[in-house]
């Protein structure tokens, strides 16, 4: 990454969730400290129709669970942990993010032209992993809501609130997380430009560093996407 000028003050460390701190470290923009309170920001993200629906859910009388409903006996924590481990393995085993082993020189390699290393394969892998995270966490969240609704009227109301919040905040979440590949591409281009003659070497240190950065961002994004799942799990553990 670009070294700070001796004449300029160092960038202040950004305090916040790991995902945001990682993105702040990979960009040149100084992110603002503090900002609007979460409740105020949430009010800006909810349009009036969603706010009305949420208000109705909160004010409605809790409904009783169906008397004949059968609650499947399963370890929800283990199910979610297995799903998370599968996603982590997908990130760790992504071929674009693997550190290549140095190969011995050959006549063919010496004669082959050096091709520029492009960001496109990294973008496609990032988008594929984001889709996997979205599908998996969405399914888990729906399953956990169904199980909450079978526990008690209060838990059923909590499940309804979570469903409304997911519908209300998903467009904003998709827009924000959808911007991450572009931030990574800017970081990639900056590192490649600074690499000089190593810009075409697939085993160069700058590219290995980028792979580690991208893996770290993906793992931090997975943590963010699992937060609602962890919240629903915590509610289930209390009942």
Image (cartoon, helix red, strand yellow):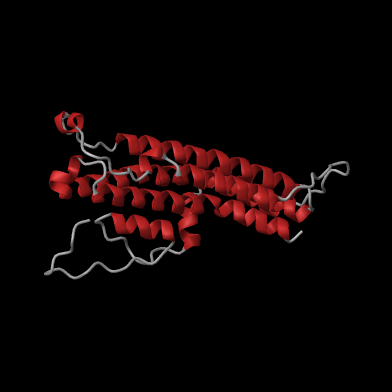
Percent across and percent down for residue 61 are 76, 52
Residue that extends furthest to the left in the rendered view of this protein: 7
The quadrant of the rendering that contains the C terminus is bottom right
For the question of whether residue 203 can be seen, the reply is yes
In the image, residue 171 above or below residue 76 = above
Percent across and percent down for residue 4 are 18, 64
Percent across and percent down for residue 217 are 40, 51
Percent across and percent down for residue 101 are 32, 44
For the question of whether residue 57 can be seen, the reply is no
Asked whether, in this view, residue 136 is left or right of residue 236, the answer is left
Front residue of 49 and 74? 74
The quadrant of the rendering that contains the N terminus is bottom left
Front residue of 205 and 82? 205
What's the residue at 77%, 52% (across, down)? Answer: 62
- Quarter of the rendering containing residue 100: top left
Q: How many marks?
A: 0
Asked whether, in this view, residue 104 is left or right of residue 146, the answer is left
What's the residue at 38%, 64% (across, down)? Answer: 35
């Amino acid at each position: 990454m670009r070294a700070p000028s001796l004449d300029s003050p160092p960038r202040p460390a950004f305090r916040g969730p790991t995902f945001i701190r990682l993105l702040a470290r990979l960009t040149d923009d100084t992110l603002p400290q503090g900002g609007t309170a979460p409740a105020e920001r949430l009010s800006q993200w909810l349009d009036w129709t969603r706010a009305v629906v949420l208000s109705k859910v909160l004010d409605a009388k809790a409904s009783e669970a169906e008397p004949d409903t059968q609650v499947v006996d399963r370890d929800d924590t283990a199910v979610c942990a297995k799903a998370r481990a599968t996603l982590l393995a997908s990130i760790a085993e992504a071929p674009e993010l693997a550190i290549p082993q140095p190969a011995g020189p050959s006549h063919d390699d010496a004669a082959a032209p050096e091709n520029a290393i492009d960001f496109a394969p990294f973008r496609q892998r990032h988008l594929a992993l984001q889709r996997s995270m979205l599908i998996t966490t969405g399914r888990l969240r729906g399953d956990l809501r169904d199980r909450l609704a079978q526990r008690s009227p209060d838990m059923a109301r909590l499940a309804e609130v979570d469903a409304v919040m997911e519908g209300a905040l998903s467009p904003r979440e998709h827009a924000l997380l959808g911007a991450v590949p572009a931030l990574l591409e800017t970081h990639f281009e900056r590192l490649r430009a600074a690499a000089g003659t190593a810009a075409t070497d697939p085993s160069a240190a700058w590219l290995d560093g980028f792979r580690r950065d991208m893996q770290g961002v993906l793992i931090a994004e997975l943590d963010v996407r699992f937060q609602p799942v962890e919240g629903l799990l915590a509610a289930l553990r209390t009942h």
